[in-house]
Image (spheres, coloured by chain):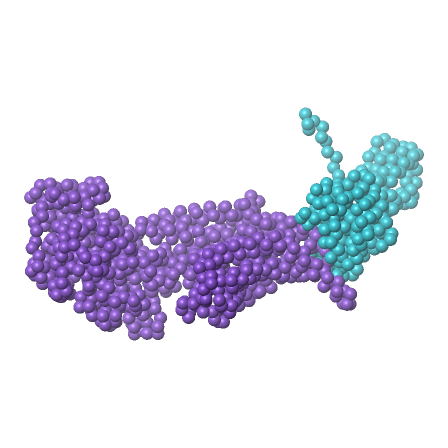
Chain colours: A cyan, B purple
Amino acid sequence: MIEIKNVTKKYGDFIAIENLSLKIEESSIYGLVGYNGAGKTTLLKTAIGMFKANNGKVLVDGENVYDNEEIRKSMFFVPDEIYFLPQANILDMSKFYKGFYPKWNDNIRKKLTEVFRLDEKEHIAKFSKGMQRQTAIILALSSKPKYLLLDELFDGLDPVIRRVVRELLIEVISETKTTVMVSTHNLRELENLCDHIGIINNKNIIYDNSIDEIGNNKFRCKVILENKSKLEDYSSINLRKLKISGKIATFIASESEEILDKKLALINPVLVEKIPLSLEEVLLEEMEVEDYDFKGLFN
Amino acid sequence: MTLKDSLTKKNITNHSFKIAFKRNIVATVLSILTLTLAMAIPAITYLKQYIGKDVKVCEFSDTRFSVVYILIVALIGMIQALITFKFLYKRSAVNTYFSIGVNRSMLYKTRVLAGTLSTFISVLVPFIILVLINLVFSSSIGLVLSYAGFLFIGMFVTAIVAYAITTLICSLTYTKAESVTYSILANLFPTLILSGLNGLMSSFLWGNTYGINNSFNYDFHGGLITHYTKLNPLLFFNKYFSNYSSYREWMSMENLFRAELLFLPIIMLFIAILIITITRKIFIKRHIENTSIMGSNKVLANILIGTVMFAGFSVFMYFTRTGSNPMLVKTATLLGILLTTIIYASFVFPLRVVGKKNLKGLILFPINLIVFFLILGIMNLGGLGYTNYIPDIDNIESMEISYRGQPDLVLSMGQSGGVATYLFENNGVFMLTDSEDIELAISLHEKLIKQGWIDSKLDNENPKDFAIRSMTLVYYNLKNGKRIKRLYPIETLSLFDEMLVLDETTAFNQLFSSIMDVDEETFKSIIPEKEFSLISVNQFTLASGKIYVKDILSTKLHLIGENEEIANEIRQALKVDFLNSSLNEKYFPTEIEKYQLYFFKDYNDELPKDIIPSNSHQLYPHGKVTFVVNSTYTNTIEVIEKYYKSESIEIESLYIVDNYNNSLANKNYDEVSPFYKTNIMIISDALSTLPEGFIKIDNPEKIKELYDLTRGIYHISDGGYMVYAKLKGEFYVITRYIPRNLLPAELKEQLGQ
């Protein structure tokens, strides 16, 4: 298990994450989303023990991860900027990582290289961005880590490869009980991959829940009453973005379906429409994204 | 930890080491090639002459360029460290190396070990090759191995020290540009500080003897860099390398290798290990989130850039304040600050120590300047007692002080084509041991100290306040064996006058007499053994030269001292006259003189009976000393007139030139002497050097009247006038001098005074 307890990380005077707490259970895939610059990479690097937290601590299997070589032998980090030795090919990089990861498996490397159709003797510098990321995934999985941290997992990957990667990760977890933490902007992929989501904004985790719960807790609602709708009618419901137009009211409800149904029943609606928010909608909702008016900008 | 865990850790450590070592292979190979070629080529060139001969020799380099080899190995150490830690400046590499299963301490250790081994190999292999080369040519295996071993240790330690310093800098910086720049500055740090201090000392510390331009081989300290070489991580082995990189069996015993020579390299090695150990802690605490961000370590930047500023400022002050025309202090200081600002800006902006959003770093610029001026102030105020120091008279064994008497008289082997004799001509020192002599010399020294630095311009109203370059030396030899040295580069003309009193010391009298009497024993007791240990009194021209005489206006010399008896007669007469003359009679004569004596060193070449002297020294390769015979030297005149009949000479015209200044008066070198002596010049040379505003006199009566006012010898502290006497029917002029108070008023007016 990865436990992040009240971690604050600063860059000079700038606070990247503040008093952040998080728990990632074993054998789970945890998806981390947030704006550019929200602190995702900082959180990952602190979780892998590269950065020392200014406050708080990160425990992996109960031990402080910072500069802990024993724990890190079972952790693999694929950053957004991937490093390869100069003039190296996949075989060279395999030798590099094999020396640091006792559980390295060459068969996995061979098989995955075939799956991704990469030439293992070609210089990696000649690979495209997507191919380099595939190489990094091959090396990560061949190391057979207990904890796998991936920053911008799907960056540069085409849809076919994304599907392959998704299936690989699911298979890895089911076979080896690996714990995966992945950051990405590609919300649709996360929905199909992760079992837990965390949204990072304003230096902290603002939303942390399982994928299943997302569909159960947030609804886009449209309610039609017999008489004209009033504000007081909806005061008992935990909602946002309420718009009333005559008898019709629309809002975003943050309630479980059962409780929401009970509360709506009290106002005797003529019609209720409840649509669970998608992950993307939840993200946009939680991040309080503004609506921009671009009309006339390019005249 | 189980056995399996321990083996795993060992394997990972080995793996980390191998990765680091492989990164350095190219640099190692290039280093081996560079160092081998640099050392082997001159070694082979020299050794091949000994092939087949059974002689004990070894040769490892060209000793003239020892500092180049030292710098090569230091560079090797630096480059190895920069390559070892190159990964610290790339974010992607940092992401990998600081996330894998190696903690920071182990990562550092394996890297340092790899780099150290690479450095070791880079220096060792060339030496192995050189040993083999030497064994081909030389007959002594033990000799070759002992010298090679010593040199290798010293060179390797030099490389490792540079490696250690660079490793420290790499751990403190976050970009490649900073690591390279600051590594160079850090390795040069002691050199920059010492050259900076020396520059300020030369310009501001009155009496300083460190780092003086010593082309005349005076007994100075050498520069601070040379003096403290043993403390300089870059240069500590330079002298040893120079002394021990070659051996010939006819060398002195001093050049044989001894075990105690290893002491310094061992100390330096220990310092390198200490630096590497401290750096490990810094590396562990490194904020890798600052990778690729320039300007992250402002303290380091400002210390090192501040050092360059200091050195630049000080060296600039040195060059502008210590030439023959020193810039005024205020002007030099303002320009120095400007230069310092340019140096500062050219580092801090590209290296982002200061930026538009980070102007806080600018505060360190004035702080740096305050430190400079603090040091400058200390120098100016006497260098914490250095300037004002005079030893207790009870502790003084003997003293030496130089002055500008009749310079080429006494301690001269004669002017020749070379400059070695100027040592004796301008700054000959002799030892004062008599207590009254020492008291007199101390009082003069006190006046020199009190005078201090002067920025002066020639002022006709007060000509004696004008200061000229002097290179006045003062040495105290103490009873405890210590030797205190001071040098005064400028002196007022009035102080030059006062220093003439040294002619009346017991020591000077003994010295002059010993030379004229050819008394070796007395001579040796007066000349400092340190400087003159190989000199015999016979080498002095006055003691052993052939003697010629000429009328003061003549251009022809006539042999007069052709046999030893006559020569001795002249010497004895001159000795009596000179030693019995007052200072005024010798240096401020009131009457015109008649004759001039020329003493030539006779190296078994036959000199013609009559010769025409020239101002070109090349025509007379033998030592030459000239002596103007003042009207008060009655004994000498009597002897001359016994053997020589005077000839009549007519002056065609006189040229009178305004004021003594640095371009006139016997000046052949930088230190101008206020002691003027008549000279002969070819007319074309003389007229081409005439400055504007001269007066030409053709009227014979006027010529006679003025000529009688001129002098062929004078201590020209009053800033008088140069005169050229053009001789009738000759292509020569005779240079003369008119004291200021003797020139008629109407001529002064014509000269604009």
Relative to residue B256, is residue A261 depicted above or below? Answer: above
Q: Identify the residue at image location x=22%, y=40%.
A: B692
Residue B490 screen position, x and y as percent: 29, 56
Q: Quadrant of residue B682?
A: top left
Relative to residue A49, is residue A120 depicted above or below? Answer: above
- The quarter in which the C terminus of chain B is drawn is top left
Residue A248 screen position, x and y as percent: 87, 32
- Please say whether residue A244 is visible from this viewpoint: yes
Residue B80 screen position, x and y as percent: 58, 56
Q: Quadrant of residue B419?
A: bottom left
Q: Quadrant of residue B525?
A: bottom left
Relative to residue A249, is residue B278 depicted above or below? Answer: below
Q: Identify the residue at image location x=34%, y=58%.
A: B214
Between residues A250 and A184, which one lies in front from this camera angle?
A184
Q: Identify the residue at image location x=22%, y=42%.
A: B688
Between residues B731 and A223, which one lies in front from this camera angle?
B731
